[in-house]
Amino acid sequence: MSDNKLNLEKRTLSGKKVASLREDGLIPSVIYGNEIKEPILTQSAYNETEKVLEDAGYHSTIDIVVDGKPHMVIVKAIDLNPVNRRIDNIEFQAVSADKPVEATTPIVLVNYDASEANKLHYTLSQIMEEIDVKAKPADLPKELEVDASKLATTEDKITIADIVLPKGVELADKELSSEQAVATVYDPAAEAAAREAEDAKAAEAAVEDTEGEAAEGEAAEGEATEEKSE
């Protein structure tokens, strides 16, 4: 059983007609997978659904009931309105408690404040913010914490090899390199100085080009004057 529970109703509207559901404060959704042979079109109240999704995200299971029938699901996709960022549509995947499933899990970097890199005012740049894992629904982690306290220089980085997976959890992508960077460290002051040097060099080159063009123009004028005098 999940801590997240949601009641859904079957819906008959689809396509462009679902816009009227959103106007009535409902979210259209679909459920598929596991023992569901045909996708089930569903709908639910916006506020209630949004709250459950905030708690479950893409990594925790949700116990839903559709017309009295229970299903255990995880969220596979959420479509947001590009203008107001409200939820437009949800895809739920039905899962079995005994079968491993894939889910997207956030990567959270912790303890950077205690690192030598932070003391030197370096900046931590997180490249990967989430990763796909595989586990039974009950074992799916809400997030994966990675210790950043040992970072000291701009040569240091956090890689996938530094992610400690809980028991029963594995990476979904077996081909993913353990050396792939999750986060890197850079010196903002040094990068700012390098940019200033590049800008100064570009400005100097532009001045030289302008002076060269002016000199060529003067030479051409001189030649033209000589030709006229002859």
Image (cartoon, helix red, strand yellow):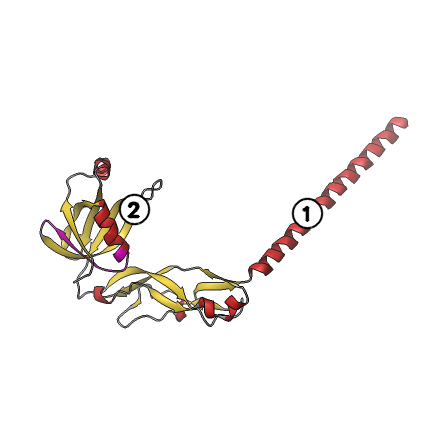
**Residue 129 horizontal/vertical position (percent):** 39, 59
**Is residue 135 left or right of 178 when viewed as pictured?**
left
**Residue 209 horizontal/vertical position (percent):** 72, 43
Q: Quadrant of residue 104?
A: bottom left
Q: Quadrant of residue 95?
A: bottom left
Q: CA distance from mark 1 to mark 2?
A: 46 Å
Look at the picture and state if 214 lies above or below 150: above
Element under label 2? strand
Which quarter of the rendering shows the N terminus? Answer: bottom left
**Residue 27 horizontal/vertical position (percent):** 22, 44
Badge 2 is on which residue?
79
Q: Residue at x 28, y 69 (%)?
A: 169
Q: Residue at x 65, y 54 (%)?
A: 197
Element under label 1? helix
Residue segment shown in magenta: 55-67
Q: Residue at x 31, y 45 (%)?
A: 80
Q: Amino acid at mark 2?
A: Asp
Is the residue under label 2 in contact with that under label 1 (CB below 8 Å)? no
